[in-house]
Amino acid sequence: MTNSIGEIANADLILACGTNTMEAHPIIWYKINEALHKGAQLIVVDPRETDMAQLATIHVRLQPGTDIALLNGLMNVIIAEDIYDKKFVKERTLGFEELQQVVAKYTPEYVETITGVPAETIRKVARAYAGAGKSTILYTMGLTQHTIGTDNVLSVANLSMLCGMIGRESTGVNPLRGQNNVQGACDMGALPNVLTAYQNVGVEAVRQKFEPFWNCQISDKPGLAIGEMMTAAGEGRIKGMYIMGENPVLSDPDANHVVHELKHLEFLVVQDIFMTETAQLADVVLPGACFAEKEGTFSSTERRVQRVRKAVEPPGMARPDWEIICGVSTAMGYPMSYASSNEIFDEMRKVTPSYAGISYQRLEKGGLQWPCPNEGHPGTPIMHCNEFVCGIGKFKPAEHVPPDEMPSAEYPLLLDTGRRLYHYHTGTMSRKTMIEDYMSSDTLEINCLDASDLEVCDGDKVRLTSRRGSIEIPVRITETVPKGLVFTSFHFSETPINQLTNPKVDAKSKIPELKVCAVRIEKIA
Amino acid sequence: MALVTVTIDGQTVQAPAGTSVLDAAQSIGIKIPALCYDPDLSAVGACRLCVVEIDGMRNLPTSCVTTCSEGMVVRTNTPAVLEARRTLLELLIANHPLDCMTCEKAGACLLQQYCYEYGVLSSPFKGDQHAYPIDDDNPFYLRDMNKCIVCGRCIRACEEIVGRNVLDFAYRGFNTKVGPFMDTPISESDCVYCGSCIAVCPVGALEEKKMVGVGRTWELEKVRTTCPYCGTGCTFDLNVKNGKVVGVTGTDGDVNGRFLCVKGRFGYEFIHSDDRLKTPLIKKNGEFKEATWTEAFDLIASQFREIKDKHGSDSFGVLSSARCTNEENYLMSKFARAVLGTNNIDHCARL
Ligand code: SF4
Ligand code: SF4
């Protein structure tokens, strides 16, 4: 996020693109609610009429996968009506002419034909966004889990720069991360192309800094992303895997394939707190400690580093994951030993400029937001204030490209997947609590028009099939989804929706197109 | 903002115009009792316990909704004020179960606290008592409306914080009752079980179901930590007794204050689930067998070494975790790069 969560409460206009914040990030929704009580406008861009969409000032109900067309349409209006921030564009950005050329053809009337959103609504939203004092954009997977996810994100950035809605309090572009420490995992370099704080492995100076520090040679070849790793495993190029705290069998697209690929490995180690679907396939399973049983830090979506504290002992022989990694490493002849997680943190911040000023001692007084370059630094609640971190902001206009799979005669419907308020990810944690007593299965949301075409009633079980797989699931007839779209979550192993989803990834971000794939439904007699 | 100067119990204090008398008093350490007042919610002046004397004003105004004005002279503990508060408390407990010895809230109940402070032992007022059934047919919390003091904090929390508007007052007078639309059980309402109403209830009317009977409030050790679910980074207290997490309560988080969602507040039982992995397991002939750490480490080391020798470093793949700590992700990256010698490391950030 470029801003802090608390600032949302003071925004004048919130543009929520592809985020069902009310269910996926309830506390962030509380801030939106606070802003609404203070008179802010809320614009929700979502094909589904979620609870939040019902509370919106304007609900922009676009066709799935047409976000770029919509965003270009907004920019078209803003430029045509001359209501963009000329000073900001002149002083802080590059490439305005190129942007102008690309969005020129996206007139509201043309965009209506792509998105299904009335031209008048597009004009209204454009004027509201550009005209408000403090506009802020929130987005999540609804924008990124597409083959054109990177372009979606760039288009959002284009819109905010065009209107100068960035780098001030309560204005900005704010991706909301799904899992509690996704931000931290990225910051720490659990990525194929970068080390901590996004220092690129391809850069010699970076390797030269880490090599003596870690006493090793670092490969200059960027590694494989998760999907590529799975493919490589299937093809026999990857022989051994070490998976810590992830359950790709349920969370990854085209799950049948993932199982097949993991079975192909010579040796698989899985470290987790439960016997997950992925752990079942392992040669060795290592019992880790959960968050309540260890010390450490998490970094939230607003770049806030906060403490995790030990409250109870791990069960049986289970150990904190860091201790296990040390054990494996030492057995392999590279001794790792730390007295505490604090010691690891202090080692890490020596080579991580954005975390250098953060210490356990400082965190006792509350969280700190990176960049925090030295111990006197208060942390950074708002990024890109006077200047973009990378200097000048460059417009990178994008063209609308339809989703990889569109409805066809054989697969006439589109499937969208997401989260439910009550569960989390693949359910490994939330399904082992009292929440399971409340919600222990999921349904497929379907519009009543599609339901009547298929002659199915509420609760009827159907067979849902894509080009990759097929599952059985009961339907729930609702106006939440428009005709032609069906929706369910990926929390439940009984209805493993990722057996159906499309593993085709965005060329740049490597994020798969989990949000849309073509499906058909058959009634089960 | 313009400052105004007021005198409270002989002390002068400067406060921004618009500040309530109650907040101004708190700012100089003068405590005024209040049941319906909550710093995170709008002030309504309903319980009247926060009455004070203000020069030039008739009757006793409620300090939570009276704003400071220049030169105002306030007294918070005159005989008239104390008498009024005592009477209000006597009225409140006339229709209250007074089962403090078994009430979950004992020790953290504001009504109990104020009766103690004001020496209110029993009520001279005799009248009807409510006999509502307890609403507990949901897995998360129970509502005992016999203990409700109709302060309306829960109603305001649900509207102003959570934005769900599930609760409101129903009926009138003595029969006034807080509940969902049409006074149905909570399970039939639009409640999303965030528990924010429980967090603000000053008495024992709203309680986490699974925390009933697990320990008195003063026995629970509170360990402040960060939520393991979504990326918002809410802070909460794990409530621990005898080495077990028995509940989660809100505290004063940087991001979330005292408020949480259903996962943060009620999603803790996996910690002590019987299904937790407790020993290393090694698969032999398709079946997992329990092993010691040394056996597991030795096997992994020899297998990984063999793969490295035969196929090279890039024949490894490592998945780190968005659910593990920063320290663990850092070590996993170091392990992949320095020990296995590959950049093939990723996690589920994209999913
Ligand atoms: S639990 Fe949350 S949603 Fe339900 S009534 Fe209480 S505040 Fe409202
Ligand atoms: S339930 Fe609690 S918070 Fe709600 S009105 Fe009654 S006493 Fe107040």
Image (cartoon, rainbow, N blue to C red):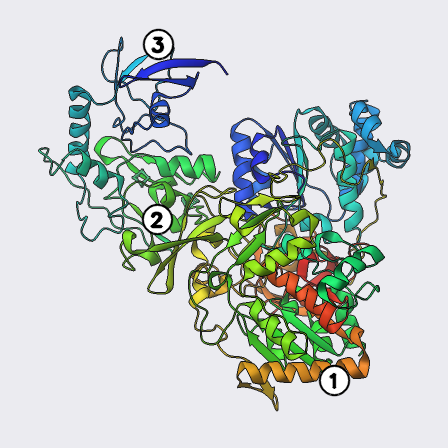
Q: Position of residue B161 (x, y in %)?
A: 46, 37
Residue type at mark 3: give it: Gly
Per the image, the residue denoted by label 1 is B306
Q: Which of disc 2 and disc 1 is earlier in sequence?
A: 2
Q: Quadrant of the C terminus of chain B?
A: bottom right
Residue type at mark 2: give it: Pro
Indicate left or right for B272 with B54 as reference.
Answer: right
Count of all numbered marks drawn on residues in the image: 3
Does residue A433 lie above or below A392 as drawn? below
Q: For the residues tagged 1 and 3, is the chain the same?
A: yes
Q: Nearer the viewer, residue A368 or A490?
A: A368
Where residue A194 sits, quadrant-wise, is: bottom right
Mark 3 to mark 2: distance in Å?
50 Å
Within-10-Å neighbours for mark 1: few <14, some 14–19, many 20+: few
Q: Which mark is residue B71?
A: 3
- Callout 1: SS: helix
Indicate left or right for B299 with A504 as reference.
Answer: left
Q: Which of disc 2 and disc 3 is earlier in sequence?
A: 3
Q: Which mark is residue B113?
A: none
Q: Residue at x 9, y 35 (%)?
A: B126
Indicate left or right for B266 with B326 as reference.
Answer: left
Does residue A21 lie above or below A287 as drawn? above
Q: Which of disc 3 and disc 1 is earlier in sequence?
A: 3
Q: Which mark is residue B185?
A: 2
Query: Chain for mark 2?
Result: B
